[in-house]
């Protein structure tokens, strides 16, 4: 261990070396430490922040730049070794490839894209007309977590056409009124395939993400983390660290004793541990220093005296309470067990129904935990100004909740705090609660009197986690001879990790969302979430309900098998209809299950192929339903859950202010569409400012697939109000009745007199003159009373539900156990598809993510609580090579309550792929896999066991 | 930690930089590929005529795989082998016409590893000398515990912990699979490595360092690997590479195999070489499989031979599944090799 001796000998700054580089066609001279990588020099010395850092160790490709035209990982390249070779970053590339990415809808969060576009550029410069497999191979070193690569591959093909002169994208400059397709019948823009509001900034490296922010005098923070899964902190000695030259501030947990949690009822976390550490990676102290290296060294100098305690590392140990993860709750009351939530709800009479069933199925399923692995690591920058005001820029998807908790923990009125969410490099639920780094950056900034930035390492991202809960599910179900689903019983144990997070909600979601779109007569579930000494789990895309859906949809196939039914038919037989109530009392205003099943059955050639292919090949089906927003806010209040304000400008532009977080899904673009639809201005003339607590009205955040439904409703209300003012002004001006005024894209007109029209800019000016004040409008989404009339009946209740069906085709190698997914057909009912490009992007991204959960990803820990591979190499997320071809069909079952009938697309489509793969493996090789992920070792073991069972004893 | 540490050579840096970031390496660096490269960066024809000097020290008691120690191999002087500079990028190796024509399995191994960016940056020398990727060794929080054997500690943590991706042929004490794909392929040609000072070792001597679990190769500190020497490909030689992975790219395979078949004009296998990577702390040859192939017509009895590929398997509790992969991968590589085009008469 490092000796905390002679801190005086430590230089505050590393020796610098002057380098001459050729960057983007110009010679530049920079002084940098000789150990700096090209990535550091580009980002932090030259301000070329378009090149991203996703792992800093060669695994993700986000830092790809071109060196003499070759794609190179700038994080593994020492700047000093580049010499006079030509370095080209995204900022220096011609715009054409980036534009094709924009037009193809290939950019979601955009974080992977500068590197991706560099690789694509290099490919196209030596292969002008690449095949799909050549594209996949060339991009295989660039991980993307959002898109499923589908639209990226299309974008490269489009760029090839453009560069080869077979398509001219330059004419589609951003000013074309309706982007790339006709709108839906009866609408001005809705339903048109359009660009995303911010894509081109992301495609050119101009978008600013949290780590791209650099403030004068900014210090770098670092959190010291526990190497033990469970230990009491006897003493922390920070003196040597504080004395190290270059260190500005050191903090420990005792300075911020207030507990917090995103769910206000269960505040069981401290910013930094005070009494105990509860998982490997739990924070114990933090420092701010002149640079990262000094901060790391300072952390090494902090001495923590731990009393090692026996860890609780699995569900059995947790239930047996071999040790207590929390000895007291947040009110100081002693605890006797590790149970952090127990939900037990029954609807109808399950046991008699099971007894009366013609066929039953019972099995235990295990869903391994996994994590979000957004390519952008969490990052926060905080500036505590001398006037006492605090500004925090954070890669969060819940600025409002962060705002509240910062106020609570720091003991500052929230009116003194401003939270800004810059461009966000992927989240998927992994950034939907406050994290230690935001509090620490703020507090260190106050102590140091300087702005402070903290950027997680990739390893810290894995340990911070808040991802998918491991769940063990004892499922029993029974059906009548005609296939009617009589009863379902699910006994669930949830491995929650060290803290509560959203745990209460998770426990409800685990049971409450399972009851559609497949109808059941009787239902009971019990969900118990336990604390363990592992990183805390939380919401990941499809929060809480992906795991039980896997068990249920596999079980449904087993019932079908016993009944001799086609798996399609058992789902059809029990399909709910629009306007029906689920057994647990949730009203489903619209559902397109039947249409979804028809679509995938037809597209996949199910009939004649299912059950009839040679051993090793198989098809599987599954379906699901998901909420479109959770009906109630996390803390009870009567205020709107979402607010939108519009400000019109004489120039003809409308500014949207909204607290919603665009996390790559495209909510900014959705807002632009809604405003354009109601006012006739072009989507490109809508300027969206979102997620800044000082400027924008509150929106609760990007979770539970609530944004399109709720923010869309608020935007619709505001835009309609503004449209009405425009209409009234024009009617008065032309002296005609208001209903005689019509609007089109770019202009308004007189319905009765052809040729009489006025462009939208003039109409806006007219309205402003008439109002005598700047033209403004606001709208809100107010809580609608839905849900069952029992305790917990409002959790999992939603104003609307999406429906999805998948058919998957797999190939299983019986010798090696390797499963290949060949094709995925998805039909997703999202209600009205406001911009189909964005819907497809969400569906493709969901499919990709679920595919990965089924076959490769696992967030597992060993007996010392250590992660089995906290990096993007050992934690396997799919590359462009193996991600299957995804065929998406959008089904639009117009919802009576959604804005224009819209529901959700961001999470629902993830659910069915996992059981569909399991069911397809059964069709291929006749084994039922009940433990995820289906890695070669497990598949092989199942096939062997089957062989052994078949062999005569 | 005494005075004047020897600088560590740095080639592409794709391995070394990662270790430094995780506190697994420190001290001064020597850049090999600066303006004046310190090691050759080309692939050149090479005639195996020089009588290879006897190795300075005999290979340190290596039990497995140590092929006959470099006693002068008088190959037909007319045919040329290849000398691959240690500074050659993996991508260049994969695309080099002479490598593709005469050593298809090696070219495929090079073209299949890592990612396009890694291949463009990483070098042949660095690939052979890279460190294991075991998370217990690499990751920061794991390193905060007592260090493992490889890091100078007393115990291997993977053995009692998570070792799903570790060795299935337990040659101990470290059970992290040898990380080099190229090493596995090169073993099939009994390649030699050339060190600075014109010393030549058989490749097998370089790989693995049983005496010291902290080391993954036997190159003494301060020495440079200059080049890899491949003997001439005989006409009729065919070779191929196969990997089993559950992610297409950007990971180490679970198991990988390279196979080389030398075929006589009468269509019978004269000599066979099959090597596996990913299964032990150094790549291994499969003498049982090789013996079963010699004398058989090309393409015959492949499955029967490959069935012996797990002869050496000594799995850990979690790696039993790799047995099947050893067989499957060896068979895959053999089938591909049997179907591969033969090396041309006159290597390009
Ligand atoms: C995502 C990813 C996937 C990968 N997949 C694979 C894979 O499937 N198969 C595989 O084999 N590898 C794989 N790799 C590893 C990669 O191939 C190695 O990191 C690379 O080959 C190392 O080469 P380098 O030139 O960058 O070595 P460096 O990092 O520069 O050096 C590595 C080591 O070798 C020493 N060294 C280098 N050259 C010399 C020399 N000439 N003389 C003496 N010492 C020298 C250095 O001192 C250092 O200790 C992968 C890496 C990543 C990031
Ligand atoms: S396998 Fe090797 S590197 Fe991994 S813990 Fe054991 S000794 Fe260390
Ligand atoms: S940041 Fe360089 S590869 Fe991830
Ligand atoms: S768009 Fe690729 S990671 Fe988000």
Image (spheres, grey):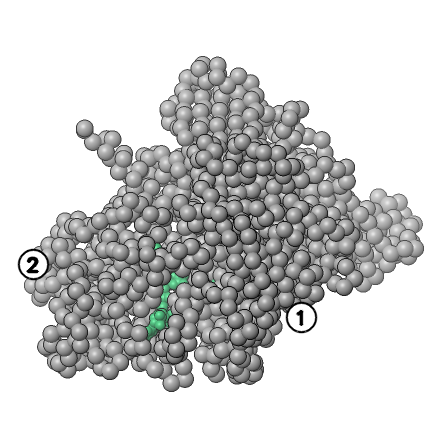
Residue picked out by circle 1: A217
Q: Is residue B79 visible?
A: no
Q: Chain of mark 2?
A: B
Q: Chain of mark 1?
A: A
Q: Which mark is residue B295?
A: 2
Say which residue appears at 41% left-offset and 40% top-offset.
Answer: A932
Residue A181 screen position, x and y as percent: 62, 53
> Assess mark 2: CB under 8 A from ligand 1?
no
Ligand 1 positioned in quadrant: bottom left
Residue B271 screen position, x and y as percent: 11, 63
The answer to which of A715 and A458 lies nearer the viewer is A458
**Real-space Cα separation, disc 1 to disc 2, in angstroms:** 75 Å
Residue B268 screen position, x and y as percent: 9, 60
> Assess mark 1: CB under 8 A from ligand 3?
no
Q: Left or right of A221: which side holds B233?
A: left
Q: At numbered mark 2, what does the secondary structure look like: helix, strand or loop?
A: loop
Q: Is residue A320 visible?
A: yes
Say which residue appears at 85% left-offset and 49% top-offset.
Answer: A725
Residue A417 screen position, x and y as percent: 74, 54
Say which residue appears at 25% left-offset and 69% top-offset.
Answer: B218
The answer to which of A80 and A878 lies nearer the viewer is A80
In the rendered view, would you say A526 is above or below B164? above
Q: Residues within 10 Å of mark 1 (few under 14, many from 20)?
A: few
Q: Residues within 10 Å of mark 2 (few under 14, many from 20)?
A: some
Q: At numbered mark 1, what does the secondary structure look like: helix, strand or loop?
A: loop
**Pointers 1 and 2 in contact (C-beta within 8 Å):** no
Say which residue appears at 48% left-offset and 56% top-offset.
Answer: A459
For the N terminus of chain A, give its image quadrant: bottom left
Q: Left or right of B14: which side holds A150?
A: right
């Amino acid at each position: 261990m490092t000796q905390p001796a002679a801190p005086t000998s430590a230089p505050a700054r590393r020796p610098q070396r002057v380098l001459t580089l050729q960057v983007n066609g110009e010679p530049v001279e920079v002084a940098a430490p000789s150990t700096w990588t090209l990535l550091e020099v580009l980002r932090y010395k030259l301000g070329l922040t378009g090149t991203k850092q996703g792992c800093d160790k060669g695994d993700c490709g986000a830092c790809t730049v071109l060196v003499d035209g070759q794609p190179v990982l700038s994080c593994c390249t020492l700047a000093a070794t580049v010499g006079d070779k030509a370095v080209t970053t995204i900022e220096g590339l011609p715009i054409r490839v980036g534009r094709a990415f924009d037009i193809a809808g290939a950019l979601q969060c955009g974080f992977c894209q500068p590197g991706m576009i560099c690789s694509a550029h290099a490919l196209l410069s030596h292969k002008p007309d690449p095949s799909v497999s050549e594209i996949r191979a060339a991009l295989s070193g660039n991980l993307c977590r959002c898109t499923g690569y589908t639209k990226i591959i299309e974008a490269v093909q489009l760029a090839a056409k453009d560069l080869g002169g077979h398509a001219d994208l330059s004419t589609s400059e951003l000013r074309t009124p309706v982007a790339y397709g006709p709108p839906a019948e009866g609408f001005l823009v809705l339903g048109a395939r359009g660009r995303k509001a911010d894509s081109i900034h992301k495609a050119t490296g101009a978008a600013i993400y949290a780590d791209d922010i650099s403030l004068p005098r900014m210090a770098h923070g670092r959190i010291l983390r526990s190497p033990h899964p469970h230990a009491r902190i006897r003493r922390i000695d920070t003196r040597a660290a504080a004395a190290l030259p270059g260190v500005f501030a050191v903090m420990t947990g005792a300075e911020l004793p207030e507990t917090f949690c995103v769910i206000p009822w269960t505040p069981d976390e401290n910013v930094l541990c005070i009494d105990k550490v509860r998982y490997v990676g739990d924070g114990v102290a933090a420092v701010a220093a002149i640079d990262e290296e000094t901060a790391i060294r300072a952390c090494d100098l902090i001495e923590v005296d731990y009393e090692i305690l026996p860890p609780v590392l699995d569900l059995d140990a947790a239930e047996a309470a071999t040790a207590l993860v929390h000895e007291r709750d947040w009110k100081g009351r002693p605890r006797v067990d590790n149970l952090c939530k127990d939900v037990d709800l029954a609807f109808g009479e399950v046991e008699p129904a099971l007894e009366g069933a013609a066929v039953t199925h019972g099995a235990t399923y295990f869903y391994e935990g996994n994590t979000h692995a957004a390519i952008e690591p969490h990052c926060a920058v905080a500036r505590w100004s001398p006037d006492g005001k605090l500004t925090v820029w954070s890669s969060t998807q819940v600025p409002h909740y962060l705002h509240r908790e910062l106020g609570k923990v720091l003991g500052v009125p929230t009116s003194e705090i401003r939270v800004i969410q810059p461009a966000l490099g992927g989240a998927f639920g992994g950034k939907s609660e406050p994290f230690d780094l935001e509090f620490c950056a703020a507090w260190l900034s106050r102590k140091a009197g300087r702005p402070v930035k903290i950027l997680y390492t990739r390893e810290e991202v894995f340990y911070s986690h808040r991802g998918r809960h491991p769940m063990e599910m004892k499922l029993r179900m029974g059906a009548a001879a005609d296939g009617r689903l009589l009863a379902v019983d699910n006994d669930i144990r949830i491995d929650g990790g060290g803290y509560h997070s959203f745990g209460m909600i998770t426990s409800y979601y685990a049971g409450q969302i399972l009851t559609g779109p497949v109808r059941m007569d009787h239902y009971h579930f019990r969900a118990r979430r336990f604390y363990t000494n592992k990183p805390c789990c939380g919401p990941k895309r499809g929060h809480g309900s992906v795991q039980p859906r896997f068990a249920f949809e596999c079980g449904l196939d087993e019932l079908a098998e016993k009944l001799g039914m086609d798996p399609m038919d058992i789902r059809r037989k029990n399909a709910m209809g629009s306007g029906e109530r689920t057994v647990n009392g949730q009203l489903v205003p619209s559902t397109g299950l039947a249409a979804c099943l028809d679509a995938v059955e037809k597209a996949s050639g199910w009939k004649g192929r299912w059950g009839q292919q040679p051993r090793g090949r198989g098809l599987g089906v599954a379906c699901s339903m998901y909420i479109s927003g959770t009906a109630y806010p996390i803390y009870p209040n009567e205020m709107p859950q979402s607010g939108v304000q519009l400000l019109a400008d004489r120039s003809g532009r409308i500014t949207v202010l909204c607290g919603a977080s665009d996390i790559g899904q495209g909510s900014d673009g959705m807002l632009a569409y809604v405003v354009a639809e109601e006012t006739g201005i072009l989507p490109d003339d809508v300027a969206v400012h979102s997620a800044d607590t000082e400027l924008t009205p509150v929106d609760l955040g990007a979770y539970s697939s609530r944004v399109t439904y709720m923010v869309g409703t608020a935007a619709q209300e505001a835009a309609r109000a503004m449209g009405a003012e425009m209409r009234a002004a024009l009617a008065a001006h032309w002296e005609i009745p208001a209903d005689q005024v019509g609007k089109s894209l770019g202009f308004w007109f007189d319905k009765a007199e052809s040729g009489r029209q006025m462009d939208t800019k003039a109409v806006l000016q007219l309205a402003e003159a008439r109002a005598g004040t700047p033209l403004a409008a606001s709208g809100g989404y107010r809580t609608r009373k839905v849900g069952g009339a029992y305790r917990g009946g409002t959790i999992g209740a939603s104003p609307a539900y999406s429906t999805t069906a998948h058919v998957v085709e797999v190939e299983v190698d019986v010798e090696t156990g390797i499963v290949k997914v060949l094709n995925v057909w998805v039909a997703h009912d999202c209600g009205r598809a406001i911009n189909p490009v964005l819907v497809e992007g969400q569906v493709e991204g969901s499919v990709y993510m679920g595919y990965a959960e089924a076959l490769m990803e696992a967030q597992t820990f060993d007996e010392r609580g250590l992660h089995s591979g906290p990096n993007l190499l050992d934690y396997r997320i799919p590359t462009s090579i193996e991600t299957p071809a995804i065929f998406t069909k959008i089904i639009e079952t117009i919802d009576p309550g959604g804005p224009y009938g819209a529901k959700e697309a961001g999470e629902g489509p993830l659910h069915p792929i996992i059981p569909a793969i399991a069911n397809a493996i059964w069709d291929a090789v006749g084994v039922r896999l009940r433990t995820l992920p289906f890695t070669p070792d497990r598949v092989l073991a199942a096939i062997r066991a089957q062989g052994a069972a078949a062999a005569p004893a | 930690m005494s005075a004047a540490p020897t600088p560590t050579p740095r080639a592409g840096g794709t391995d070394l930089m990662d270790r430094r970031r995780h506190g697994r390496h420190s001290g001064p660096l020597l850049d090999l590929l600066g303006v004046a490269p310190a090691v050759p960066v080309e692939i050149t024809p090479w005639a195996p005529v020089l009588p290879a000097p006897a190795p300075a020290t005999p290979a340190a008691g290596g039990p497995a795989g140590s092929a006959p120690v470099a006693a002068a191999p008088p190959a037909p002087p007319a045919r040329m082998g290849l000398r691959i500079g240690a500074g050659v990028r993996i991508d260049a190796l994969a695309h080099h016409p002479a490598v593709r024509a005469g050593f298809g399995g090696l070219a495929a191994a090079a073209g299949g590893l890592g990612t396009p960016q890694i291949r463009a940056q990483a070098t042949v020398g660095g690939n052979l000398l890279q460190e294991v990727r075991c998370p217990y060794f690499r990751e920061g929080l794991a390193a905060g515990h007592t260090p493992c054997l490889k890091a100078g500690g007393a115990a291997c943590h993977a053995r009692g912990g998570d070792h799903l991706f570790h060795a299935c042929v337990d040659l101990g004490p470290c059970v992290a699979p040898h990380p080099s794909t190229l090493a596995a392929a090169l073993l099939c040609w009994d390649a030699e490595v050339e060190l600075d000072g014109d010393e030549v070792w058989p490749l097998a001597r370089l790989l693995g360092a049983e005496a010291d679990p902290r080391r993954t190769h036997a190159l003494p500190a301060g020495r440079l690997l200059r080049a890899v020497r491949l003997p001439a490909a005989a006409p009729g030689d065919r070779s191929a590479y196969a990997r089993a992975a559950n992610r297409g790219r950007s990971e180490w395979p679970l198991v990988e195999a390279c196979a080389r078949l030398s075929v006589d004009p009468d269509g019978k296998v004269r000599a066979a070489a099959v090597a596996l990577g990913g299964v032990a702390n150094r790549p291994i040859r499969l003498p049982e499989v090789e013996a079963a192939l010699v004398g058989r017509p090309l393409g015959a009895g492949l499955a029967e031979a490959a069935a012996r590929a797990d002869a050496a398997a000594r799995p850990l509790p979690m790696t039993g599944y790799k047995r099947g992969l050893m067989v499957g991968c060896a068979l895959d590589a053999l089938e591909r090799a049997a179907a591969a085009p033969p090396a041309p008469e006159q290597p390009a």
